[in-house]
Image (cartoon, rainbow, N blue to C red):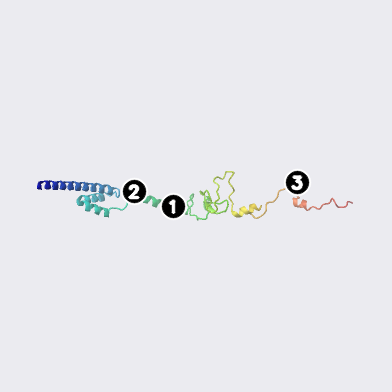
Amino acid sequence: MEQLIAQAAHLLIALGGAYYLALWFALIVWTFQDIQTRTRSVIAQIFATLLVVLFSVPGALLYLLMRPRETLEEQYERALEEEYLIQDLETAGRCPHCQRPVQDDFQFCPYCRAPLKQLCIACGRLLSLDWPHCPYCGTQQPTEEGDVTVQERRSPLEAVQRALGRTPGGRRPEKTLPENEATTLPPGWSRSMRENEPDTSKLPRA
């Protein structure tokens, strides 16, 4: 009976030792792989691995407290995001053609005359060149200048003036005479002079 208990105790000790060795080896491998993804420093990699080799589970706990928070891949992605943000901030207030500073309400660049924004064909608000619809009135914007369905871009004031039959300068367009009427007028006469000419057909003849 005592011999069976002793054999069972030896078996348990052997299984415990094997489990401990397997855990110790797994912690060493995991620590070495993990530290390689977080730093390129050879000294830091050796120190973290030796910490687990010498102290096993307590060494792994110490490594978890001391290891870098971000991996190399996370650091690379964060650096790319910061670079993109910096580029966006640098190009936000600059002309995309000449890279000179411009303001948000500029329709054209004052230096190279490049178009920066477009006027809405309905409400006349400034829109980005790549917006297909106006966010203020919802009107679809023209995409090609040569398309026959494209309406002429103009400000609301010009649209009202043209609807009233006036030119953008505030004057009504002059009416041109028909070709046959213009040829019958004497030289130097205009249509207004012809209309104001007195009717001599009813005057008594001498």
Left or right position of 204 against 145: right
Residue shown at the point (24%, 53%) measured from the top left: 61
Tag 1 near tag 2, CB within 8 Å: no
Q: Which residue position is annotated with label 1? A: 88
Q: Amino acid at mark 3?
A: Glu
Q: CA distance from mark 1 to mark 2?
A: 23 Å
Per the image, the residue denoted by label 3 is 181
What residue appears at the point 15 percent right and 46 percent down from the top-left corner?
11
- Mark 3 and mark 2: Cα distance apart in space: 85 Å
Pick the front one: 164 or 176: 164
Amino acid type of disc 2? Glu
Q: Secondary structure at mark 2?
A: helix
> Where is residue 23 drawn, in percent x and y?
22, 48
In the image shown, does 117 or 16 lie closer to the viewer? 16
Residue 73 marker: 2
Q: Residues within 10 Å of mark 3 (few under 14, many from 20)?
A: few
Q: Give the secondary structure at mark 1.
A: helix
Outermost residue, left side: 2
Contact? badges 3 and 2 (CB < 8 Å) = no
**Which comes sooner in the sequence, label 1 or label 2?**
2
Which label belongs to residue 65?
Answer: none
